[in-house]
Amino acid sequence: MPDEHGHPSTEEMRLGVVMAALADPLRAKVITELAADDADPERTCASFELGVTKSTVTHHFRVLREAGLISQVDYGNSRKVRLRRADLELRFPGLLDLIVAQE
Amino acid sequence: MPDEHGHPSTEEMRLGVVMAALADPLRAKVITELAADDADPERTCASFELGVTKSTVTHHFRVLREAGLISQVDYGNSRKVRLRRADLELRFPGLLDLIVAQE
């Protein structure tokens, strides 16, 4: 079962759901940026400059979180996201390389 | 430009479009079956037993063809499909392995 923040466990991740998440250009942009940065920084949603309304941003990050691509941490007045790199490598080996290579 | 049957060239294939095609469970089933068979047989659309109407089958195969995942050959009274394995390996190395591994 996903945790209380909607993060699925590695075993719960499904390739079809991950692909549906990545089929959207804005969500693909977020994951490509995160995957290309080996330092795996925590970033705010606003830092991706998606050029859409805040509620649309919230929607896209929820889709990414529920697919298992990112984790979100709530710091009270701000929320940060991080790529679930190790989990993704374990569950879908090579997927992130594929995404970064298409940049 | 895609050819007259809607097959994109390798360079025209886009990962986002391929992922959108694979996000559907029936289309993922078709590609998983094809990718798992190293003999790369030509198959009829009907052979996949998708359990949906003929027009829905036609739709799904068009999406797969336009994404570049399969090629379709018209034999007059029948149409056969084949995985574009070599093109996919060239354009998205490792993608087919990832799909087969999730079976």
Image (cartoon, coloured by chain):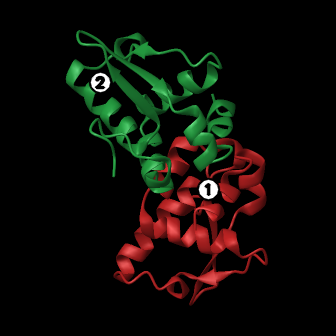
Chain colours: A red, B green
Q: Is residue B97 above or below residue A37?
A: above
Q: Is residue A17 above or below residue B55?
A: below
- Which residue is labeled 2 in the image? B57
Q: Is residue A100 above or below residue B17?
A: below
Q: Chain of mark 2?
A: B
- Cα distance between the residues tagged 2 and 1: 30 Å
**Residue pictured at 57% horizontal, 19% vertical:** B40
**Residue pictured at 56% horizontal, 40% vertical:** B87
Which element is circle 2 on? helix
| Contact flag, marks 2 and 1 (Cβ < 8 Å) | no
- Whether residue A82 is visible here, answered yes or no, is no
Relative to residue A9, is residue B55 drawn left or right? left
Point out the frontmost of discs 2 and 1.
2
- Which residue is labeled 1 in the image? A68
Q: Residues within 10 Å of mark 1 (few under 14, many from 20)?
A: many
Question: Where is residue A85 drawn, in percent x and y?
Answer: 74, 62
Q: Chain of mark 1?
A: A
